[in-house]
Amino acid sequence: MTEDDILRRAADAFSRYDIMMAEKRKLDDELRSLCREYGMAVRVWGLAPHMLRKAVNARLGDKAA
C-alpha cells in the first residue's frame, strides 16, 4: 500500500467522521431542547439527557430508547 492510498483512505474516513459528528451535534442539540421542554412540563429544572432517558424508559419501556 502506498502513501497516496493511505491518504485517500484517511480522507474518506475523515469525511465520514465529519458527517457523523455533524449529525451527533444535531442530536445533542435536539436532546438538550427536549430536556428543557420536558423539564418545564414536569416542573424540574436542570434535567440532563441521561435523566430524560430514564423517564422515557420508565414511561415507554426499555425498547423505546
Image (tube, rainbow, N blue to C red):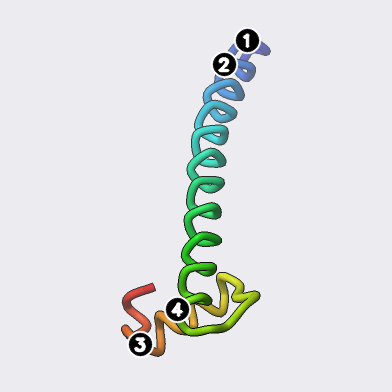
Nearest to viewer (mark 1 / mark 4)? 4
What type is the residue that disc 4 sits on?
Ala
The residue under label 4 is 41
- In this rendering, is residue 56 above or below 21? below
Mark 3 closeness class: few <14, some 14–19, many ≥20 residues within 10 Å: few
Q: Residue 5: where, in percent of width, then height? A: 58, 14
Q: Which mark is residue 4?
A: 1
How far apart are the two marked residues, 1 and 4, measured between alpha carbons?
Answer: 55 Å
Q: Residue 31: where, in percent of width, then height? A: 50, 61
First of labels 1, 4 by sequence position: 1
Q: Residue 47: where, in percent of width, then height? A: 60, 76
Q: Which mark is residue 59?
A: 3
Q: Which mark is residue 8?
A: 2
What type is the residue that disc 3 sits on?
Arg
What type is the residue that disc 1 sits on?
Asp
How far apart are the two marked residues, 3 and 2, measured between alpha carbons?
Answer: 47 Å
First of labels 3, 2 by sequence position: 2
First of labels 3, 1 by sequence position: 1
In the image as oriented, which residue stretches furthest toward the bottom? 58
Mark 4 closeness class: few <14, some 14–19, many ≥20 residues within 10 Å: few
Q: What residue is drawn where x is 52% and y is 69%?
A: 35
How far apart are the two marked residues, 4 and 2, measured between alpha carbons?
Answer: 50 Å
Which quadrant of the rendered structure holds the C terminus? bottom left
Query: Could you say which is closer to the camera, residue 38 or residue 52?
Result: 38
